[in-house]
Image (cartoon, helix red, strand yellow):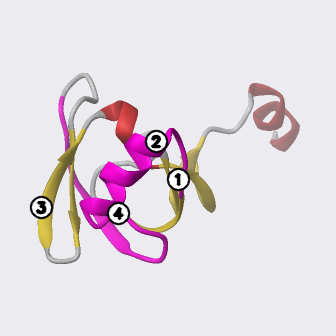
Amino acid sequence: METKVMVATLDKLKVGRSAKIEEVVGEFKIRRRLFDMGITPGAELYLRKKAPLGDPIEITIRGYELSLRKSEAACVRVLGEFDIEAKADDKEAKK
């Protein structure tokens, strides 16, 4: 498994990783709620914890801890390090 810097949604980020918010998407009500909590483009965050089934997640942003539902985290696009699994064909080609 390799690590790659890319843009993906917050719910895909691994525990212990930091990321920068690129954009917040979704319905107006959800976007407004996230903006009101300080989740805005350009803000840095750190993923502290995930519940066993992935919902909720706990992040540190702007100096405070915040819990989000997985559905809310899916509306936040972040730039960060993500684990990428190599395809089986790629593994065979490297041998």
What residue sits right under mark 1 in the picture? Answer: 82
Earlier in the chain: of badge 4 and badge 3, it is 4
Q: Is residue 53 above or below residue 94?
A: above
Q: Quadrant of the N terminus?
A: top right
Three-letter code for the amino acid on which mark 2 is drawn: Lys
Q: Which mark is residue 12?
A: 2
- Residue 2 on image: x %, y %: 59, 52
Disc 1 is placed on an element classified as strand
Neighbours of disc 1 within 10 Å: few (<14), some (14-19), many (20+): some
* Residue sitting at x 35%, y 63%: 39
* Residue sitting at x 46%, y 42%: 12
* Residue sitting at x 88%, y 37%: 93
Neighbours of disc 4 within 10 Å: few (<14), some (14-19), many (20+): many
Alpha carbon distance from label 1 to label 3: 22 Å
* Residue sitting at x 33%, y 33%: 70
Three-letter code for the amino acid on which mark 4 is drawn: Ile
Q: Which mark is residue 39?
A: 4
Relative side of 65 to 40, left or right: left
Of marks 2 and 1, the one in the foreground: 2
Earlier in the chain: of badge 2 and badge 1, it is 2
Q: Is residue 61 above or below residue 84?
A: below
The image quarter containing residue 45 is: bottom left
Q: Quadrant of the C terminus?
A: top right
Alpha carbon distance from label 1 to label 4: 20 Å
